[in-house]
Image (cartoon, rainbow, N blue to C red):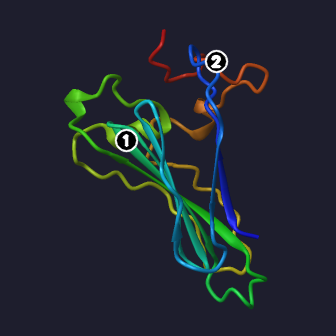
């Protein structure tokens, strides 16, 4: 089956927006027509048989999700991984809202890299445990949001209180 992305607008104040289905070939290089909704652009592309890219951008940020097969695909039953990257497209002083939270700490504007604990990827089965240790304020549990109230701003490092 081909790679697909369904774009659906679900935002306060936006009524009657139509969903948009984006499809690219499963095997060949292919690019779907970009979808633009207000300031947000969504793009879907197949770079080659083993890799598809979904890019979501606005004037301030670009988020890229890349689905790719793990190395030695035949030996790994064509297992896939999902790599996410986030980049800023404007000067920090021009941002409407200063980045905050786990990801926002990356965009603090000081141009100083902070490297934390790194997991050991040498065994055949990897169990992630680093959880940003040393690279974030506090520990990962400090950022957990109550599942019963997923849009809550009540956590240790909130900027909303």
**Helix, strand or loop at mark 1:** strand
Q: Where is residue 19 drawn, in percent x and y?
A: 66, 37
Quadrant of the rendering where the N terminus is positioned = bottom right
Q: Which residue is drawn at 33% across and 36% down?
A: 60
Q: Which residue is drawn at 48% across and 51% down?
A: 34
Residue occupied by mark 2: 152
Q: Where is residue 82 drawn, in percent x and y?
A: 61, 62
Q: Where is residue 105 drawn, in percent x and y?
A: 39, 38
How many C-alpha atoms fall within 10 Å of the one at disc 2: few (<14), some, or many (≥20)?
few
Left or right of 160 on screen, residue 49:
right
Q: In this view, does 83 lie above or below 156?
A: below
Q: Where is residue 125 drawn, in percent x and y?
A: 74, 74
How many C-alpha atoms fall within 10 Å of the one at disc 1: few (<14), some, or many (≥20)?
some
Residue extending farthest top: 161
Mark in front: 2 vs 1 = 1
Left or right of 150 on screen, residue 67:
left
Q: In this view, does 129 lie above or below 141?
A: below
Left or right of 100 on screen, residue 83:
right
Q: Which residue is drawn at 64% across and 18% down?
A: 152
Q: How many labels does the image show?
A: 2
Mark toward the start of the polypeptide (2 vs 1): 1
Residue occupied by mark 1: 61
Q: Which residue is drawn at 58% across and 80% down?
A: 28
Instruction: Please identify the quarter of the rendering in which residue 80 is found.
Output: bottom right
Q: Distance of mark 2 from mark 1, alpha carbons?
A: 23 Å
Q: Nearer the viewer, residue 93 or 114?
A: 93
Q: Is residue 86 above or below residue 137?
A: below
């Amino acid at each position: 089956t081909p790679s697909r992305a369904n774009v659906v607008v679900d935002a306060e104040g936006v009524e009657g927006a139509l969903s948009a289905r984006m499809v690219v070939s499963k095997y060949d290089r292919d690019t779907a027509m970009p979808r633009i909704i207000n300031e947000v652009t969504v793009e879907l592309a197949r770079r080659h048989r083993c890799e598809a890219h979904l890019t979501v951008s606005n004037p301030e940020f670009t988020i890229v999700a890349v689905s790719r097969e793990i190395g030695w695909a035949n030996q790994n039953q064509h297992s896939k991984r999902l790599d996410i990257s986030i980049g800023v497209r404007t000067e920090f002083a021009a941002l409407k809202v200063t980045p905050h939270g786990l990801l926002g700490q990356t965009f603090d504007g000081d141009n100083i890299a902070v490297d934390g604990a790194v997991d050991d990827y040498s065994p055949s089965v990897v169990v992630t445990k680093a959880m940003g240790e040393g690279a974030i304020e506090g520990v990962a549990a400090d950022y957990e949001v109550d599942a019963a109230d997923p849009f809550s701003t009540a956590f240790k490092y909130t900027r909303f209180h």
